[in-house]
Every structure is written in C-alpha cells, then in structure tokens.
Image: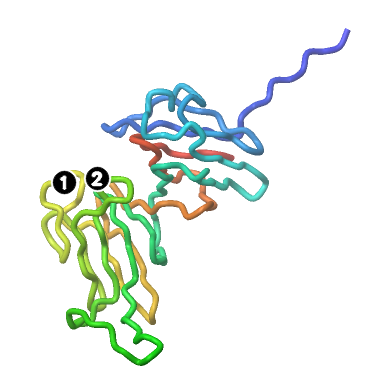
Amino acid sequence: MSAPAAAVVPRGRILLIRPDGTEGGAHPLHDGENLVGRGQGSLFEGDLYLSPRHAEFVLGPEGLMVRDLRSLNGVFVKIEVEEMLESGDVIRVGQELLRFEIISPPAPLEDGTEVAGTPNPGFWGRLSVIVGRDVDGSAFPLFGDAIVMGRERGDILFPEDGYVSGTHARISLRDGRVYLVDVGSSNGTFLRVRGERRIPSGAFILMGQQLFRVEYR
C-alpha cells in the first residue's frame, strides 16, 4: 500500500492589511505561478476593482516576480527607495491617482513652420489627476529641480485627502532623468507596475481596493 502524498507546503503568502494596520486573512504562494484576481480566493472575491485575472505572482529560486495581467486598475508597489520614472507611469499618493508625463519642446514641421502655443517657462513634465478610465482631471506642470507633493506643504497640495501626509513625496529632475521618492509619509507612495517587477519579501502591494504585504522564504 503506497504512502499518501505529502502535502505541498506554501513558500509564501499574500497577507491582507486592514485599514487600521492589523493583519487579515492570507492567500498562499506556491513555487511557480500563482494567479490572483476576483474569484481566485476568499481575499479577492468581493473586490469589484480587481479583474478576474488581475496579476500573477511567480515564486522561484531568485525570489518573487509580480506580473500585471493587463488588469484594468493595475498593481501598485510601495516604493522604499528612489525610483526612476518613465513617461506614462502612474503614481498613487493617498487616494490620488496621478499620471506622470514628460513634456517635450514642440518640434517644427518639416517645412520649418513653428508650432504655436503659450510660451513654455521651463516645464519639463506634468502630473495629471486620473478621475476615470481615459479621463484626466487637473494637471500640474513640473518645473525647476524638484516638486514636492503633500496635504499641507509643498508645490502640489491635496488638502482634502486625509491619507496624504503634510509632506508626502518628491519628484526630481537630475541629469535629464526624473526620480520619485517618498519623504517619510505615513501611508507610503505607490508606483504602478510596468509589466512585471521583482519584489522583496515584506513588500506592500495595492490591488483593487485592498493593501497586502507579500512574505516568502
């Protein structure tokens, strides 16, 4: 009589973090591919902001990779160090969704005709508030060496958002490249994953309307 097969022990877990900071339920992470989405586990069933196939977590010898499966609302990772931004990146600060875009100087037409527009006083980028699918709200020009975002202090303020710290995050221009850094905010600054991203154990992730911490060994 053959012995029963040994149960496969998960190497990690996706842990729900409640709004008060306490830990909620957990979803196991096994070696290989782990699908996450609405209907893929009790943690995700009731979140209508999750796509049915939202993300894939791939756990291997070199760590954990998260892949956004072209979800509608994205996967956001809490940044721990300064991150280089690309045009089109989406940032979450408090409850604000912001799209970063580089502003390039207008190029003349092939016949040499210059494009008319308001004189540019040195803007190199802009942040647009995302208010819906393919719908942007207010836009903030970026200029100088750095722009600070916050609820009470800085160049771009979100006074009505209680999840934004007084001084929250900074976007800097150095040597032709743009960088984002959190400046000690209470709730963190999150960056939407571009395709896929390797994440360390202990990283915080926003998916749908929920915050998670990823742990693995």
Quadrant hosting residue 102: bottom left
Q: Which residue is mark 1?
A: 161
Q: Residue at x 20, y 44 (%)?
A: 163
Q: Which residue is found at the position 32% from the left and 30% from the top?
A: 18
Task: Tell me the amino acid under the disc marked 2.
Answer: Gln
Quick one: 7 or 150, which is closer to the camera?
150
Q: Is residue 7 left or right of residue 96?
A: right
Disc with the residue nearer the chain's start (1 vs 2) = 2
User: Which residue is at 30% across, 34% downward?
Assistant: 21
**Disc ID at residue 95:** 2
**Secondary structure of the residue carrying numbered label 2:** loop
Q: Are marks 1 and 2 in contact (CB under 8 Å)?
A: yes
- Return the residue nearer the eye: 79 or 137: 137
Q: Residue furthest right?
A: 1
Residue 16 on image: x %, y %: 40, 31
Tell me if 27 is positioned left or right of 88 in this view: right
Q: Is residue 91 above or below residue 214?
A: below
Q: Measuring from the top left, give residue 90's x and y in whole percent.
A: 36, 55
* Residue 97 screen position, x and y as percent: 28, 50
Q: Residue type at mark 1? A: Asp
At label 1, counting other C-alpha atoms closer than 10 Å, the crowd grade (few under 14, some 14-19, many 20 or more) is some
